[in-house]
Image (cartoon, rainbow, N blue to C red):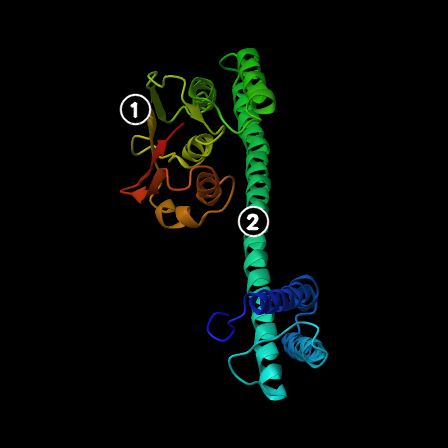
């Protein structure tokens, strides 16, 4: 204002006019035209309505200024001469500032809110997917456990009552204790040990070995995270009479890191088909759980080598 208006009262007058015009243009765009555009997705309707808004506002405010000038309602003191065209152009560009400001602010705020909504939806999707993946484990485990019990009863060996009691303990853990986001490592390892011993009963032609480190210092882990690896080891272990069949699993800790290794022998024909076998709980589901819960805090390597299938998981726990 100091460049072309020397009178203090005139500066206040033009400031009020300009600011009110910008605010009016801004809020009409922000509250009405932009929401209509987001709803209808019609860019030409937005452009035409914005141009019409600018023309109407610039015309109304030019008319108001002419009334002030002609009737001398407010003393105007210019250091230069203005004609009506100059007045209209001046109002036009000031209205344009308000329109552009309303558009950009509305776009920015809506983009931010859309990002927040996407984050919420992603979290809800992750939780739902995680619940689905965990739910898949229960029937799979029950199927394997009942097979073990059936085999024990069929050959009339071992202690079926004790086996049934172990199955009940395992199911109790799944139903009542692991329905949380995280559980103590001690409880999870006890569950794994019970499961490993139970499944070893029906593997007469296979040597099984489980080593667990007890130095976990009350760390927390997502429940039922390691069990699919053991399930697959017992399911796909070789059953050849011409070689030694084995399943070896060990769990160690290095500070807050859990290091899980599981290796089992597999038959030679299964080496090429094993990665494509999608029966039961596969690695794809485990990777999804790891991605959802641990993201960049894990390293998983799994695959067949030399008639053995090896899984190594390094996990940074809480």
Question: Measured along the vertical axis of the image, is residue 201 above or below residue 238?
Answer: above
Is disc 2 placed on a helix, strand or loop? Answer: helix
Of 45 and 169, nearer the camera is 45
318 on left or right of 73: left
Along the horizontal axis of the image, is 45 left or right of 286?
Answer: right
Q: Whole-Å distance between the Cαs marked 1 and 2?
A: 36 Å
- Mark 1 or 2 closer to N-term? 2
Check the image and report above or below for 67 versus 123.
below
Describe the element under mark 1 as helix, strand or loop: loop
Circles 1 and 2 in contact, beta carbons < 8 Å:
no
Badge count: 2
Q: Identify the residue at the far left of this view.
A: 306
Residue at point 68% right, 68% down?
33
Which of the 4 quarters of the picture holds residue 135? top right
Image depth: mark 1 or mark 2 in front: 2
**Quick one: 64 or 215, which is closer to the camera?**
64
- The reply, left or right, for residue 99 in relation to residue 237 is right
Picture layout, residue 294 above or below residue 190: below
Q: Position of residue 309 (x, y in %)?
A: 34, 39
User: Relative to the observer, which residue lies in front, 38 or 200?
Assistant: 38
Q: Position of residue 315 (x, y in %)?
A: 36, 33
Residue picked out by circle 1: 255
Name the disc covering residue 184, or none: none
Q: Which residue is disc 2 drawn over?
A: 116
> Closest to the observer: 39 or 283?
39
């Amino acid at each position: 204002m100091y460049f072309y208006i020397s009178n203090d009262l005139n500066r206040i007058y033009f400031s009020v006019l300009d600011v009110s015009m910008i605010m009016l243009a801004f809020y009409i765009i922000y509250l009405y035209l932009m929401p209509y555009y987001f709803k209808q997705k019609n860019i030409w309707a937005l452009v035409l309505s914005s141009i019409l808004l600018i023309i109407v506002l610039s015309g109304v405010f030019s008319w108001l200024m002419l009334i002030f000038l002609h009737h001398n309602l407010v003393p105007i003191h210019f250091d230069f001469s203005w004609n009506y065209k100059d007045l209209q152009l001046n109002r036009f560009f000031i209205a344009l500032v308000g329109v552009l400001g309303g558009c950009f602010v509305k776009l920015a705020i809506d983009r931010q809110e859309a990002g927040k909504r996407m984050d919420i939806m992603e979290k809800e999707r992750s939780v739902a997917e995680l619940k689905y993946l965990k739910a898949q484990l229960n029937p799979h485990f029950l199927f394997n456990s009942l097979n073990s019990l059936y085999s024990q009863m069929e050959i009339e060996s071992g202690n079926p009552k004790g086996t049934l009691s172990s199955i009940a303990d395992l199911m109790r853990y799944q139903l009542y204790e692991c329905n949380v986001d995280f559980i103590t490592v001690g409880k999870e390892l006890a569950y794994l040990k019970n499961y490993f011993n139970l499944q070893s009963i029906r593997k007469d032609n296979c040597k099984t070995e489980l080593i667990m480190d007890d130095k976990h210092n009350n760390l927390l882990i997502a429940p039922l995270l390691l069990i699919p690896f053991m399930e697959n080891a017992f399911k796909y272990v070789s059953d050849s009479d011409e070689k030694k069949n084995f399943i070896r699993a060990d769990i160690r800790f290095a500070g807050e890191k859990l290091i899980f290794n599981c290796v089992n022998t597999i038959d030679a024909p299964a080496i090429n088909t094993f990665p494509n076998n999608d029966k039961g709980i596969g690695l794809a589901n485990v990777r999804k759980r790891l991605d959802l819960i641990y993201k960049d805090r894990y390293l998983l390597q799994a695959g067949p080598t030399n008639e053995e299938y090896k899984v190594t998981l390094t996990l940074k726990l809480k």
